[in-house]
Image: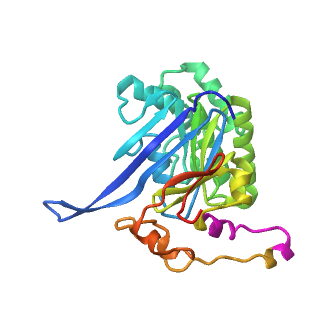
Amino acid sequence: MSDQAPIVVVENLVKHFPVTRGIVIQRKVGAVRAVDGISFSIARGETLGLVGESGCGKTTAGRTLLGLYPATGGTVTIDGHDVRHARGEEMLLIRRTAQMIFQDPYASLNPRWTVSDIVSEPMRVHHLLKGLERSERVTELMRLVGLSGRLVNRFPHEFSGGQRQRIGVARALASDPKFIVCDEPISALDVSIQAQVVNLLEDLQDQFGLTYLFIAHDLSMVRHICDRVAVMYLGIIVELAERNELYENPLHPYAVALLSAVPIPDPKKDRARKRIILPGDVPSPINPPSGCRFHPRCPRADARCKDEVPEWCEAAPGHWVACHHI
């Protein structure tokens, strides 16, 4: 991690999707509170992991952070630029600085374009290279992600899932970005291919000094690649700490339950530990619980948890948590 100013600063980011009723005249009857006030920063060269159950708002947070979804509230600053209020040339500069690797390698590549068209698109949009130089750069990027430069005239359907994800990585690198949002880049791949893609991301980070926001379900993989980890539940971040600190000393009951599900290679230790099964289902983001959002499923919950929102506090140096019982 660098001692310089953070490359990404997120303050109280909010993204609500309106719920409407009616066919001709639609009226708003509610909102899906997908992201409901999250704050964090990412240092240059750092990898921040964002974990949580499906539907907790991780992907929405990543897309809103880059401006792919317009934010409902809060501020996002990437490399000194305000994403929410950027327009024209400034937004183009942000798009060049910050890129995204999408979750599904089968849906994120245009099936009608060749690999050359797909990888060179950021160069065309940002007017980086032309003609032969652009073609040579595409070939170089293909080799950089472990694919042959002779494959540039093929179409996405001619590649496996792992190869498609590598093409997605090459496209993200084409504009020479500083920050990349990795939206579950390995969840759709076979286990043997997952390690290859993660090792590729680590090598590229070392080579180009990249900064990552790594969104994932696989907590063991997150510990491998990330410097710090943020735990998200129902639109909010409930705990944020350095990776080893979080895995060895989780403070929030939800983080404790998540980590109890991580497989342990030693069968004796795995059988000896207590697996925490959370009761009930995740509440609806349209009508989240009052007070602490985790209280309906929390084994420690009391009357205060039902009525009072827990304060975001630093329980130890660099270890932040929102819980009344810390």
Q: Residue at x 69, y 45 (%)?
A: 227
> Where residue 258 sits in the image (x, y, percent)?
63, 67
Snapshot quadrant of residue 176: top right
Residue 267: in magenta span: yes
> Where residue 322 sits in the image (x, y, percent)?
53, 58
Quadrant location, the N terminus: top right
Q: Along the line of sight, which residue is nearer the eye, 147 or 87?
A: 87
Q: Along the line of sight, which residue is nearer the eye, 34 or 21?
A: 34
User: Position of 243 compared to 10: left or right?
Assistant: right
Question: Does the image show residue 141?
Answer: yes
Question: Does the image show residue 71?
Answer: no
Q: Residue at x 68, y 65 (%)?
A: 259
> Where residue 140 sits in the image (x, y, percent)?
69, 29
Snapshot quadrant of residue 82: top left
Query: Relative to 225, does residue 22 appear above or below in the rendering?
Result: below
Quadrant location, the C terminus: bottom right
Q: Residue extending furthest left?
A: 25
Q: Residue at x 45, y 42 (%)?
A: 11
Q: Along the line of sight, which residue is nearer the eye, 248 or 259?
A: 248
User: Position of 296 compared to 84: left or right?
Assistant: right
Snapshot quadrant of residue 272: bottom right
Disc tally is 0
Magenta stretch?
255-269
Q: How is the image coloured?
A: rainbow
Query: Relative to 283, does residue 35 appear above or below in the rendering?
Result: above
> Where residue 225 sits in the image (x, y, percent)?
71, 48
Residue 257: in magenta span: yes
